[in-house]
Image (cartoon, rainbow, N blue to C red):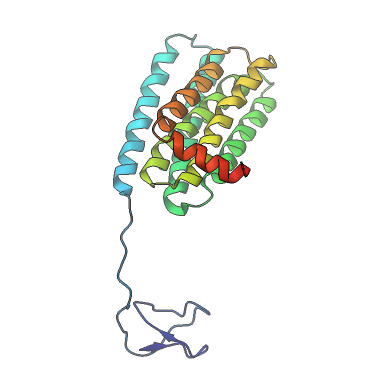
Amino acid sequence: MRRCPDCGVAVEGAWSRCPLCGRTVMGPMRPDPFPAVPLRFSRRRIYRILLLASLVVILASFGAQMLFDRGHAGIGLVRSVWLGLSAMWLVVLMAVRARRDIAKGTATVVVLICGICAYWDYLVGWDGWSLTYAVPIVCGCSILALVIAVPALRIEAGDHVLYSGTMVLLGLVPIVFTALGWVADPIPSVSCGALAVIVLVMQERDRVSDVLHELGKRLHI
């Protein structure tokens, strides 16, 4: 059995370094007594779905470009679509690798990207493309990322309620900006809000009893 020369602990399994101090262990290797537990989901399947969703978003952006001029407004839309795709990939990759605090990580990614967009918009003279296009597209793509990641990772009912609340929040933020009159075109914001409602209804229609039970536990009802 391998041992650490510094800690003096016995190390079983295919460890080349001590898990406590990082020092190279010495001695013959003994097989790990615990069986290898495979992942409950297929990363390859998640990445395929993510790639397909990205292609759909790109094609939808091309269709949306036909409704806008090729001037500065169209440039802002294209810029926002690619930022949204970046947010979607970041959220899914974070969920697959970490699988903890997905809601917190998603909010961090959205706030970071939208903040950079707003600052970018401010530096170039504030045309409003960040609030009109970037925020709703990034929020919408993050909702799609949660749609891909949460079912594939087989999230428990308690965490599922939290992620559903995250989707609602992502859909409400652009609507609030529209209500305050901060956007030049309400269509992207309204579309993002509609996407959040559709996704929430589709995901929760078969889990109503579980969601109500979990809310009762969390709210002590």
- What's the residue at 35%, 89% (across, down)? 1
Classify residue 53 by image quadrant. Answer: top left
Q: Is residue 189 above or below residue 50?
A: above
Q: Nearer the viewer, residue 25 or 10?
A: 10
Q: Is residue 43 above or below residue 73?
A: below
Is residue 182 left or right of 53 when viewed as pictured?
right
Classify residue 204 by image quadrant. Answer: top left
- What's the residue at 65%, 25% (across, down)? 121
Percent coordinates x, y for residue 159 in the rendering:
50, 46
- What's the residue at 68%, 21% (across, down)? 126
Percent coordinates x, y for residue 218 in the rendering:
59, 45
Q: Nearer the viewer, residue 145 or 119?
A: 145
Percent coordinates x, y for residue 127 in the rendering:
65, 17
Percent coordinates x, y for residue 116 in the rendering:
62, 34
Give the quadrant of the C terminus: top right
Q: Residue furthest front?
A: 221
Q: Nearer the viewer, residue 154 or 94?
A: 154
